[in-house]
Image: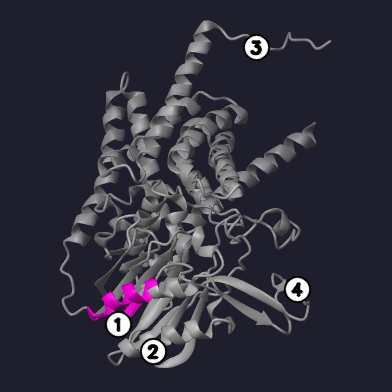
């Protein structure tokens, strides 16, 4: 018979306190969630105080389990509000995609427990009071961890939540999105302390509030200076045509109809060439075929005919593959006949009107489950277990970043090409800038997720990449949102969701490299090193206790 004598019976006051704490945690989740797009800008300001209720709750927790239990509720509410859309939840959506989206809502908060666990462990070294000042460091560490491994998903980096606060995010050209996260959290910690001391120490209250205000105003005034700076009137520009075909993302992958799809693209592209476009951009996987396989020579000929007729380059998302007859890489697939190996990529191709040479880039950051089964390289049998309807879950990882080069008006124009999800990785984009890219393009297909928060968040996050690197960003999205974002993160032109359209914009070219472009890893590396030190000290303390016993 199991004894229940050790079960703690809570008093009515304790139960009431727990209910209040849960409400505070839910409040933190709601305030943080509505700080993100698509909620309007004024709500973004909640991000500077949204962690305060949460901090009051975890201050009272005395064990790692209690801290993480409270943290999970906060993180779960945040995930529910911000990334509910990942499962697509449309009538045509694949059941596996829906399951994956549902799992993510529960799994993502569990990963964020890295942050709260580090906070608790630090208390054993520095005490609870000082550990609150370290909380932002641990949070940034957790955000950086979410850019690693096959499960990477840095979508909810807090800096991304500030995307619509254009003035404030200008300092990202120095500290990046991770640095913005740290500032946001330090302001939260300062507000938390000011409220804590309000009733019995007004001097401390005003002190913490003043420091919080200063920490807010420094990036704000820096942003005012940058936005109002004199722009270089001699800045060269390239006229770019952007195509948004608005194809059904599910039906497009059914066999047949490639010629009709191409006709749609050519028609929209001709509208751009008539306005003087020198470069045309088509979205991710524009044609649902391996165009350069030799099977679609008529389609390739039609594309080149259009390019030569209009003397225009084409940058397009496209499935691509490479055959390995000798020394195939470890992740290569074997042909059914078994006589060769091959790799398939979610790629960007650059077609030149004056040459048959095609420049290629294979997507490096693949969407977990949607484009690559996590850890399939180590556990190949997983590939057969997880394969969703439109067959996108088997892409190989691209090998290196590519900066596309075009010869236009006797100048060499250098372009960074990102595929969809890659634009949410702050440090990754800087690899292209250090290779002298003069502007950034993003080809994407966000139509999978309908008119949900996802496409709007994805578009706004690109504003951070523009500011971090001081480069214009041009997005071509299958069903929207296609746009031009200038180097200050300001959207100069954008389309509506689910419209068939094309437009032409003049995109500035510049060779500027920001401090962040050159040194993107300072904030995440320093925070990670400190966090590893905290873990190491705790391990040594645990070993010491074990040796004593």
Given residues 527 and 157, the one toward you in this image is: 157
Q: Residue at x 47, y 31 (%)?
A: 129
Distance of label 3 from label 1 (alpha carbons): 73 Å
Q: Secondary structure at mark 1?
A: loop
Identify residue for label 2: 353
Residue 434 appears in the rendering: no
For marks 3 and 1 on the same chain, the one whose residue lies earlier in the sequence: 3
Identify residue for label 3: 8
Q: Position of residue 28 (x, y in %)?
A: 41, 31
Q: Most extreme residue toward the right, as rendered?
A: 1
Tell me which corner region of the image, top left, top right, bottom left or bottom right, holds residue 405: bottom left
Identify residue for label 1: 278
- The local crowd at label 3, few if under 14, some if 14 to 19, many if 20 or more residues have their Cα within 10 Å, is few
Do residues under tags 4 and 2 come within 8 Å of each other at their CB atoms? no
Q: Position of residue 293 (x, y in %)?
A: 59, 81
In which quadrant will I find the C terminus? top right
Q: Position of residue 20 (x, y in %)?
A: 45, 18
Magenta stretch, residue numbers: 264-280
Q: Residue at x 43, y 33 (%)?
A: 29
- The local crowd at label 4, few if under 14, some if 14 to 19, many if 20 or more residues have their Cα within 10 Å, is few
For marks 1 and 4 on the same chain, the one whose residue lies earlier in the sequence: 1
For marks 4 and 2 on the same chain, the one whose residue lies earlier in the sequence: 4
Relative to 491, say whether 195 is above or below: above
Lateral position of residue 31 relative to residue 97, left or right: left
Identify residue for label 4: 336
Given residues 507 and 139, the one toward you in this image is: 507
């Amino acid at each position: 018979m199991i004894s229940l004598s050790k079960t703690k019976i809570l008093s009515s006051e304790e139960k009431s306190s727990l209910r209040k704490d849960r409400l505070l945690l839910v409040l933190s989740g709601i305030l943080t969630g509505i700080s993100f797009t698509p909620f309007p800008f004024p709500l973004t300001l909640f991000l500077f105080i949204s962690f305060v209720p949460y901090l009051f709750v975890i201050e009272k927790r005395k064990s790692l389990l209690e801290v993480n239990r409270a943290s999970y509720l906060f993180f779960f509410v945040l995930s529910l509000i911000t990334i509910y859309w990942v499962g697509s939840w449309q009538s045509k959506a694949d059941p596996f995609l829906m399951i994956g989206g549902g799992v993510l809502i529960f799994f993502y908060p569990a990963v964020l427990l890295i942050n709260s666990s580090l906070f608790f462990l630090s208390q054993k070294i520095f005490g609870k009071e000082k550990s609150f000042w370290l909380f932002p460091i641990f949070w940034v560490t957790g955000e950086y961890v979410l850019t690693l491994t096959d499960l990477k998903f840095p979508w909810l980096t807090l800096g991304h939540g500030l995307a619509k606060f254009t003035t404030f995010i200008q300092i990202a050209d120095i500290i990046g999105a991770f640095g913005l996260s740290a500032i946001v959290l330090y302001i939260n910690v300062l507000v938390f302390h000011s409220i804590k001391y309000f009733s019995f120490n007004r001097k401390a209250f005003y002190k913490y509030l003043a420091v919080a205000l200063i920490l807010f105003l420094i990036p704000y005034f820096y942003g005012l200076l940058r936005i109002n700076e004199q722009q270089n009137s001699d800045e060269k520009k390239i006229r770019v045509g952007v195509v948004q075909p608005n194809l059904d993302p599910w039906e497009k992958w059914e066999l047949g109809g490639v010629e009709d799809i191409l006709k749609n693209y050519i028609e929209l592209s001709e509208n751009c060439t008539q306005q003087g476009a020198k470069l045309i951009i088509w979205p991710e996987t524009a044609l649902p075929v391996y165009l350069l396989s030799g099977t679609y020579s008529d389609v390739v000929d039609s594309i080149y005919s259009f390019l030569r007729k209009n003397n225009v380059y084409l940058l397009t998302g496209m499935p691509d593959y490479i055959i390995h007859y000798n020394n195939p890489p470890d992740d290569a697939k074997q042909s059914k006949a078994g006589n060769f190996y091959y790799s398939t990529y979610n790629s960007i191709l650059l077609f030149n009107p004056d040459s048959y040479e095609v420049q290629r880039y294979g997507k490096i950051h693949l969407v977990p489950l949607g484009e690559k089964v996590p850890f399939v390289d180590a556990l190949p049998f997983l590939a057969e277990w997880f394969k969703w309807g439109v067959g996108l879950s088997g892409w190989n990882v691209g090998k290196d970043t590519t900066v596309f080069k075009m010869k236009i008006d006797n100048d060499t124009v250098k372009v960074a090409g990102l595929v969809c999800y890659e634009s949410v990785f702050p440090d990754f984009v800087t690899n292209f800038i250090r290779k002298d890219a003069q502007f950034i393009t993003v080809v994407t297909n966000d139509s999978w997720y309908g008119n949900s928060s996802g496409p709007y968040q994805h578009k706004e996050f690109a504003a951070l990449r523009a500011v971090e690197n001081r480069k214009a960003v041009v997005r071509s999205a299958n069903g929207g949102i296609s746009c031009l974002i200038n180097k200050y993160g300001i959207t100069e032109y954008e389309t509506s969701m689910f419209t068939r359209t094309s437009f032409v914009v003049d995109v500035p070219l510049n060779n500027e490299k920001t401090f962040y472009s050159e040194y993107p890893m300072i904030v995440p590396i320093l925070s990670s090193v400190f966090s590893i030190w905290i873990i190491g000290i705790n391990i040594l303390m645990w070993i010491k206790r074990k040796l004593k016993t």
